[in-house]
Image (cartoon, rainbow, N blue to C red):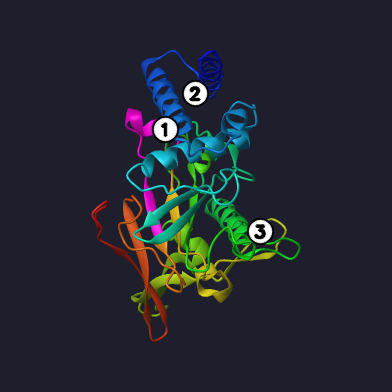
């Protein structure tokens, strides 16, 4: 009992430091996150290093732990089967009937994101959509490689942690890329950044006749790559690349616990049309889900109606 009380005290200290303030809103968030962390530890689904990493003082570890706890809370209605070894393999294992669904969680760091976007003051702020998209592509690439392996390292598939018939979902928590309290889940295309990261869809553009000045065509720009700060081309067509067919979907979330005080925390599921082991609609809680419908000249990305969300 003494050890448990000490752990809870350490967690509370770090929560108060991260979400400082004595006003009512800060206190509500602190209490909410304390309950989320406590329930996650008690559930037995947390990594054995969870509390140590949560209270380590490292930003990256704190937000990774927070993301895992909040994802677990969103999955509370799912069945979590027993696992051979907690702390090895993807973060979560839940069941879709008789099929295993593995969920790997990542919370991108706000690297190369302008400070005035992350902490807006008075005045206009430019939308750093390319910098944000690069954080999404990097996060998805890293978790994809953990699944399929790299040049010098076995992936979950080769090691047997994830079976050939198992579904695999990458849950990307974009909360650290927000502009203050405002979500940054939607990209320049007006589709989620997650969709822009796995399909070659760019900004919406109009084609105008120079003579008549009339709009003769409109649609999303075809954007198979985006350049990083080193001018290298970063692919944005992961779901059209057969190497990544083992990825079932991207679960795009924006969770930091502030929904308890009314802040919007949107979410979306982007389904892989070429997935070897797809997940069904409505399996994951999300405001919107996107499916790619194959047409003669490619794919049409559509937002579909689900019981969790609504079609706008």
Q: What whole-number distance in Å separates the C-alpha atoms at marks 3 and 1? A: 31 Å
Residue positioned 32% across, 32% down in the render: 262
Residue 237 seen from this side: no
Above or below residue 248? Residue 177 is: above
In the rendered structure, which disc, 3 or 1, sits on the residue that comes first in sequence?
A: 3
Question: Which residue is disc 3 drawn over?
Answer: 228
Quadrant for the C terminus in the image: bottom left
Q: Nearer the viewer, residue 187 or 140?
A: 140
- Observer-nearest of 127 and 154: 154
Left or right: 231, with 48 as reference point = right
* Left or right position of 247 against 290: right
Q: CA distance from mark 1 to mark 2?
A: 10 Å
Residue 260 in magenta? Answer: yes
Q: Is residue 12 left or right of residue 216?
A: right
Q: Residues within 10 Å of mark 2 (few under 14, many from 20)?
A: some
Residue 271 tag number: none
**Which residue is labeled 2 in the image?**
19
- 151 versus 251 height, above or below: below
Q: Residue at x 65, y 31 (%)?
A: 58
Task: Name above or below for residue 117 compared with residue 271.
Answer: above
Locate residue 142: give its quadrant: bottom right
Residue with the mark numbered 1: 257
Residue nearest the observer in this picture, 226 or 215: 226
Please give the range of residues in magenta: 255-269
């Amino acid at each position: 009992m003494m050890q448990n009380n000490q752990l809870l005290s350490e967690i509370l200290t770090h929560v108060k430091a991260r979400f400082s303030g004595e006003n009512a809103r800060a206190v509500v968030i602190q209490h909410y996150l304390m309950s989320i962390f406590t329930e996650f530890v008690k559930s037995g689904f947390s990594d054995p290093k969870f509390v140590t990493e949560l209270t380590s003082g490292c930003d990256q570890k704190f937000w990774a732990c927070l993301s895992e706890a909040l994802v677990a809370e969103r999955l509370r209605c799912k069945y979590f089967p027993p696992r051979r070894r907690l702390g090895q393999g993807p973060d979560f294992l839940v069941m879709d009937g008789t099929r295993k669904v593995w969920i790997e969680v990542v919370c991108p760091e706000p690297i190369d994101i302008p400070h005035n976007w992350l902490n807006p003051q008075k005045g206009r702020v430019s939308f750093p959509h390319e910098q944000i998209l690069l954080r999404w592509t990097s996060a998805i690439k890293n978790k994809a490689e953990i699944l399929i392996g790299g040049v010098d390292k076995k992936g979950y598939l080769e090691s047997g942690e994830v079976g050939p018939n198992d579904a695999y979902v990458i849950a990307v928590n974009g909360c650290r890329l927000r502009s203050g309290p405002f979500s940054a889940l939607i990209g320049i295309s007006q589709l989620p950044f997650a969709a822009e990261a796995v399909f070659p869809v760019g900004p919406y553009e109009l084609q105008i006749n120079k003579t008549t000045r009339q709009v003769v065509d409109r649609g999303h720009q075809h954007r198979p790559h985006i350049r990083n700060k080193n001018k290298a081309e970063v692919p944005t067509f992961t779901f059209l690349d057969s190497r990544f067919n083992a990825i079932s979907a991207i679960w795009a979330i924006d969770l930091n616990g502030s929904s308890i005080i009314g802040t919007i925390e949107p979410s979306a599921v982007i389904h892989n049309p070429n997935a070897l082991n797809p997940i069904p609609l409505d399996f994951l809680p999300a405001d919107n889900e996107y499916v790619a419908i194959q047409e003669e000249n490619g794919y049409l990305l559509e937002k579909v109606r689900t019981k969790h969300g609504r079609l706008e």
